Amino acid sequence: MSVEEVFVHVGLDDFDSPLGGCTTHLASILVEHLDHEVEFIDYPNLVRLNPNIPWKTRGNGAVALRFKVSRAKLDEVLSLVFRTANSYVHEIGLHPKSQPCIAVYTSVVRGIDRRLRWLSGKAVRDVIALDVALRTAERAGVLVKPVVEGRLRGVIGALAAIGNPLDDCDYTYELIAYRDRRYWGLRDRLVDYESVVEMDKATRNATFLNVDYEVGKALITPRGPDPVLFGIRGEDPEVLVDALRVVRCGEPIDRWLIFRTNQATDAHLVRVRSLGEVRVYRSVIAEGIVTSRPRVLRGGHVIVTISDGVNSIDVAAYEQTGRLTKVLKMLMPGDRVIVYGGVRPSSSRHGPTINLERIIVLEAIPEKLVHNPWCPMCGKTMKSKGRKAGYICKHCKITLPPSARVVVELDRSSITGTYYPPPRAYRHLMKPPERIGRENTGKPVKMVPCWHQP
Ligand code: ATP
């Protein structure tokens, strides 16, 4: 690279609001504006952060744009970014809860400051205080630009996006297509279900979570007022462009863009050595022994308690996780499990609870069925004479001691195994089973020539 050039990383977050708008949509507009001004060194990175953050709007996503530009042009390019972001917010209307923010990190080498990497790792797995984020920005020399003076929370996500260039971890891609402004706010997306099925079948193994065949539902379309028409997730950007051509829509596609992302990589999960290490608002992988019978709540949610011998915690499977509720219902005290999920804080009605995303049943103990003995004379089932009082045959009047009870051990080992939720219950960071063994590492492949429109 010429000494006259610098690497620029622009982090964006909190541009989405219940009034419309979305951080990824702003990113697609910025890409259009910057395309002839700079040289992009990567696809925009869509970095999903801690899914348990209570103040997120939807999927807790932040975006980083990464490009090279000549020093002479840097100021002009950055003021274009700030102007575009400001007018985006003002055009949509600023929601009282939004704290949109831009962060800019420039460097003569391609690498990212280790403090930003640390912050990013923490932001996907934990909660970050604003002052910690601001201090990190200052130390790493990051320029922080809130759209509204004093509303700074978006800086956490903006810095975290910059700090994860997805260069030493698993990653996937998502092609997001956006709606024409006239369609914003309409809940239903006019996307033809049959064409999504066609696309899914044509791109099998290279795309994932397109359709939930159990309920006949396309999963590529969101529900809310945001400008996203659909998103196709996959392993290969070229295949995503092919997939886009197969999907038929009854409304126009205004623009589209391919992101590289940490979605579907399980980046949020932290394995704990004991239940004492489980903290609220984190996502954990924890092992324990079931200590309660499953409790089924109104609405179909199921709860069991697990323990490691010292600490215990409730594990909940929600009705919409379908088969996970069925697995919890089959568990018995004594079974050994590994649970995956986000930790919800306690409320007036329950203690801290792990919201189940996946479960491995390691060991299912045999179920002991106790049966009254049969009469040695007539063969009929004997009656109990009361607790610890033994048995009597009503016909022959023969009695037997309590030890004569028949104990049958029912083998339950067939329920051991790993269980995932149905595709419709996936959240952004959860890795679907079809991705296991397909993990990416290291640098991204070369960018495909056509990765955005316009
Ligand atoms: P969308 O998925 O549509 O982009 P969102 O769910 O990302 O919406 P935001 O409006 O971006 O919602 O809100 C998330 C807010 O939480 C941002 O202000 C972000 O800076 C902050 N945040 C993200 N991760 C963390 C974290 N780990 N600790 C503290 N704050 C965080």
Image (tube, rainbow, N blue to C red):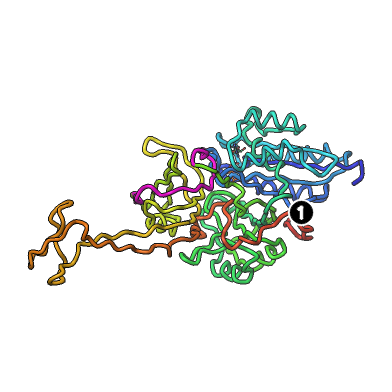
Instruction: Tell me where residue 207 appears, x and y as whole percent.
Output: 63, 63
Indicate the secondary structure of the residue bearing disc 1. loop
Seen in the image, is 196 located left or right of residue 362? right
* Residue 300 to residue 413: above or below: above
Residue 3 lies in the magenta stretch: no
Which residue is located at x 78 percent, y 47 percent?
34
Instruction: Tell me where residue 229 appears, x and y as whole percent.
Output: 59, 56
Q: Is residue 215 visible?
A: yes
Instruction: Tell me where residue 198 appears, x and y as whole percent.
Output: 59, 71
* Residue 115 to residue 69: above or below: above
Which residue is located at x 39 percent, y 62 percent?
412
Q: Is residue 86 visible?
A: no
Instruction: Tell me where residue 18 appears, x and y as whole percent.
Output: 54, 43
| Most foreground residue, 159 or 409 | 409
Q: Quadrant of the C terminus?
A: bottom right
Amino acid type of the residue tagged 1 in the rendering: Lys
Q: Residues within 10 Å of mark 1 (few under 14, many from 20)?
A: few
Seen in the image, is 331 located left or right of residue 448? left
Which residue is located at x 55 percent, y 66 percent?
192
* Residue 212 to residue 296: above or below: below
Mark 1 C-beta closer than 8 Å to ligand 1: no
| Most foreground residue, 139 or 273 | 273
* Residue 250 to residue 319: above or below: below
Seen in the image, is 294 located left or right of residue 76? left
Please tell me in which quadrant of the rendered image residue 120 appears.
top right
Q: Which residue is mark 1?
A: 443
Q: Which residues are magenta?
A: 275-297
Which residue is located at x 55 percent, y 54 percent?
222
| Most foreground residue, 450 or 236 | 236
Please tell me in which quadrant of the rendered image residue 240 appears.
bottom right
Seen in the image, is 284 located left or right of residue 294? right
